[in-house]
Image (cartoon, helix red, strand yellow):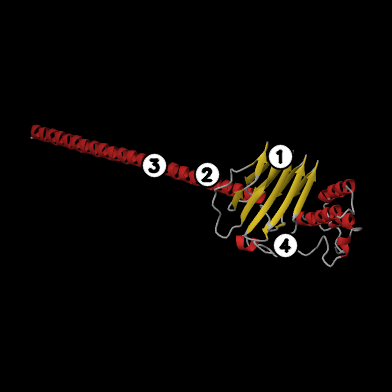
Amino acid sequence: MTDDAPELRASDADRERVAEVLRDALAEGRLDMAEFEERLEATYQARTYGELAPITRDLPAQRTAEPAVSLRKQPPRDGSWASRIIGGEGSSSWAVAIMSGFQRKGAWTVPKRFNSFVFWGGGEIDLREANFADHEVEINCVAIMGGMQVIVPPGVEVVVRGIGIMGGFDHREEGVPGEPGAPRVIVNGFAFWGGVGVERKLTRAERLRLKEERRQEKLERRAERRELHAARRQERWERHEDAVQRHLDRHEEALERHRERHEERWEQHRDRWEERRARHRDRRGRRGL
């Protein structure tokens, strides 16, 4: 690992590479179980490259051409299954938990065959963000008085072939057809007084994305309802205005008719009055003669 960026944040894949070095050192006898567990705990608690570097500094893997922790990042994936089947040997090929636990998760590469063993412990093998070394990979699980959980992303075909004695393998995810180009995951092994579960789950990022999409759809539906209500209110208001205008028009027409009748009666009254005055003048004129 380069020393010019000790404060750079470490990823889950970086921690897994350090953990793999520790497992190799345990298998070769370079570390006892107490040292292994202590360093493994420090590995998963590390947040930066500066915290990861001392954990494997005295182990041979640090002197090889490929460092246990590399600042080189994988090329971005386009999200397709073809981009996630990358070949190679895999970044981790086995895991052991004796009265403890292990995890394989994040951006790691699943080999063609991954072997795992737990005794009075537990393990989690999460393939949701993983790459795959081949179109078909095998997860071999041996659980003795312990349990393991295999988590696969939607779209992956799952085949379960494990044997359980006073224990069992979860077959619920079998029979779901895979998407075109998606890998096939075979889960086999042996469970004694233990169990191996298989679960199909979305990643947290995907769940958040779907949640955000549902939230946006809900906001859009609310906006559409508000627009519909506003349109209905506008329509009701326009109908009210039309009714008021019709009422005003009828009132205006009634006033006009009343005014016309009043003028007509006034004209008639004035004509009769003029006629009476004329007759009165005529009578006075005849008396004067």
The mark found on residue 239 in the picture is: none
User: Residue 9's spot in the image, x, y percent?
Assistant: 80, 56
In the picture of the structure, the residue carrying the numbered disc 3 is 241
The mark found on residue 89 in the picture is: 4
Looking at the rendered image, the disc whose residue lies closer to the viewer, 2 or 4, is 4
**Labels 2 and 1: the sequence-earlier one:** 1
The residue located at (87%, 47%) in the rendering is 33
Q: Are marks 2 and 1 in contact (CB under 8 Å)?
A: no
The mark found on residue 192 in the picture is: 1
Say above or below: 251 vs 76.
above
Left/right of residue 243 with respect to residue 183 in the rendered view = left
**Labels 3 and 4: the sequence-earlier one:** 4
User: Residue 91's spot in the image, x, y percent?
Assistant: 75, 59
User: Residue 63's spot in the image, x, y percent?
Assistant: 88, 64
- Front-lying residue, 259 or 196: 196
Local crowd at mark 1 within 10 Å, few (<14), some, or many (≥20)?
Answer: some
Say above or below: 34 vs 129.
above
Q: CA distance from mark 1 to mark 3?
A: 81 Å
In the picture of the structure, the residue carrying the numbered disc 2 is 222
Q: Are marks 2 and 4 in contact (CB under 8 Å)?
A: no
Q: Are marks 2 and 3 in contact (CB under 8 Å)?
A: no
Three-letter amino acid code at the position of disc 4: Glu
Residue 248 falls in image quadrant = top left
Q: CA distance from mark 2 to mark 1?
A: 54 Å
SS class, disc 2: helix
Local crowd at mark 3 within 10 Å, few (<14), some, or many (≥20)?
Answer: few
**Labels 1 and 4: the sequence-earlier one:** 4
Residue with the most extreme bottom position:
65
Three-letter amino acid code at the position of disc 1: Phe
